């Protein structure tokens, strides 16, 4: 999965800012909040970059800005060197062949009134007319690819568990053979064992297809297992970026240390040690002196 530094990036985000405007009903005034602040990163072909940060740090806003769904107030987004920051609707439709998204909530992201077969071919039908036989064949291949039974095609999303629905969402994203998939917390609504199988599937598909992932998560344990590089987002700005090993094993920024210390672990003793480390990291970040404190 590791990509060479010499490979030109597939996605290049430079100085991206996202600002939401909200009009107060009782006043004429428009309140503007910049929730993503001059964020820069790139993703090489076949690479997984994780964006981690706590709730509200701006992770989803970055993903949505790339998809043209959030108000960009500065910076540029390039795909294969092409500026797509303000792509119009026609270009967005074309871009859907290159970029797809998998959302966190598999209960809300699949249209409950369509059969799984129709859901899977939806992104393809935007692009081309499909005969009944061609559709059927594609659907069967996609279902098999994500480990779902063939008879799932005629059933509705309501018949499936969260993990199965996420497999269907993955199959839908795959249908157009995208080069980049934005995974916005794709496993955080699933239980731990289902999480692992869905992550394994995503990793396997990446090995087979060479696609890149922008992997949005608040879970460092998942990121550590899954990503090549990490960008740590704090209040809309990237505070640290590097390989998974460098960032998770030798975090430099106090916020990253606090994030790592906050990650839940199954061992209570380790959990207590982490809690103490987290408190120390927070005190350090606040500039409070640490008697006898060594760098972790
Ligand atoms: N459509 C919107 N209009 C106004 N503010 C928004 C909108 N969407 C998000 N925000 C605000 O932008 C900030 C960043 O939100 P965002 O959803 O990007 O964070 P996140 O890191 O994905 O959080 P989470 O981990 O909870 O999903 C938050 O303060 C949120 O309230
Ligand atoms: Mg989010």
Image (spheres, rainbow, N blue to C red):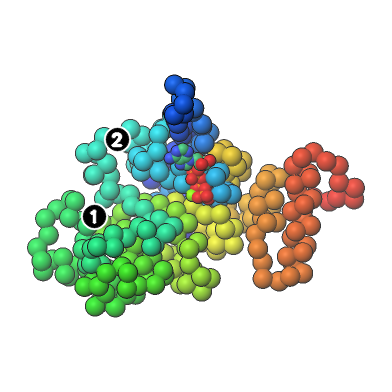
- Checking the image for residue 251, the label placed there is none
- Up/down of 134 relative to 75, above or below: below
Residue 77 falls left or right of residue 236:
left
Residue at image position (51%, 36%) is 36
194 and 94: which is toward the camera: 194
Q: Please count the marks in the image.
A: 2
Residue, far front: 26
Residue at image position (29%, 78%) is 149
Cα distance in 3D space between marks 2 and 1: 18 Å
Asked whether the residues under the numbered discs 2 and 1 touch, taking CB atoms below 8 Å apart as contact, a structural biologist would say no
Residue at image position (35%, 72%) is 160
Residue 80 occupies quadrant: top left
76 and 148: which is toward the camera: 148
- Up/down of 159 relative to 208, above or below: below
Is residue 182 shown to the viewer in this render? yes
Q: Is mark 1 within 8 Å of ligand 2?
A: no
Q: Position of residue 282 (x, y in %)?
A: 75, 47
Q: Which residue is mark 2?
A: 87
Secondary element at tag 2: loop
Whichever of callouts 2 and 1 sits on the residue coming sooner in the sequence is 2
Secondary element at tag 1: helix
Residue at image position (63%, 51%) is 247
- Checking the image for residue 123, the label placed there is 1
Is residue 196 shown to the viewer in this render? no
Residue 112 occupies quadrant: bottom left
Residue 75 occupies quadrant: top left
173 and 25: which is toward the camera: 25
């Amino acid at each position: 999965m590791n990509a060479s530094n010499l490979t030109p990036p597939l996605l290049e985000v430079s100085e991206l800012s996202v600002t939401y405007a909200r009009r107060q009903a009782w006043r004429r005034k428009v309140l503007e909040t910049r929730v993503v602040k001059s964020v820069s990163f790139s993703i090489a072909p076949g690479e997984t970059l994780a964006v981690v940060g706590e709730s509200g740090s701006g992770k989803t806003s970055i993903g949505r800005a790339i998809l043209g769904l959030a108000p960009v107030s500065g910076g540029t987004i390039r795909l294969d060197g092409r500026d797509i920051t303000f792509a119009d609707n026609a270009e967005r439709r074309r871009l859907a062949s290159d970029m797809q998204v998998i959302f966190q909530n598999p209960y809300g992201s699949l249209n409950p009134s369509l059969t799984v077969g129709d859901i899977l071919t939806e992104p393809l039908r935007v692009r081309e007319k499909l005969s009944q036989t061609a559709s059927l064949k594609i659907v069967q291949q996609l279902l098999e690819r994500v480990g779902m039974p063939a008879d799932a095609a005629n059933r509705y999303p309501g018949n499936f568990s969260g993990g199965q629905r996420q497999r269907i969402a993955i199959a839908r994203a795959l249908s157009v053979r995208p080069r980049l998939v934005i995974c916005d917390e794709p496993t955080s609504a699933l239980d731990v064992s289902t999480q692992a199988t869905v992550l394994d599937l995503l990793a396997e598909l990446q090995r087979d297809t060479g696609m890149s992932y922008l992997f949005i998560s608040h879970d460092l344990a998942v990121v550590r297992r899954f990503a090549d590089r990490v960008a740590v987002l704090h209040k809309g700005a990237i505070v640290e970026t590097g390989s998974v090993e460098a960032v998770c094993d030798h975090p430099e920024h106090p916020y990253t240390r606090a994030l790592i210390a906050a990650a839940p672990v199954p061992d209570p003793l380790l959990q207590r040690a982490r809690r103490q480390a987290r408190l120390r990291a927070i005190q350090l970040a606040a500039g409070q002196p640490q008697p006898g404190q060594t760098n972790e």
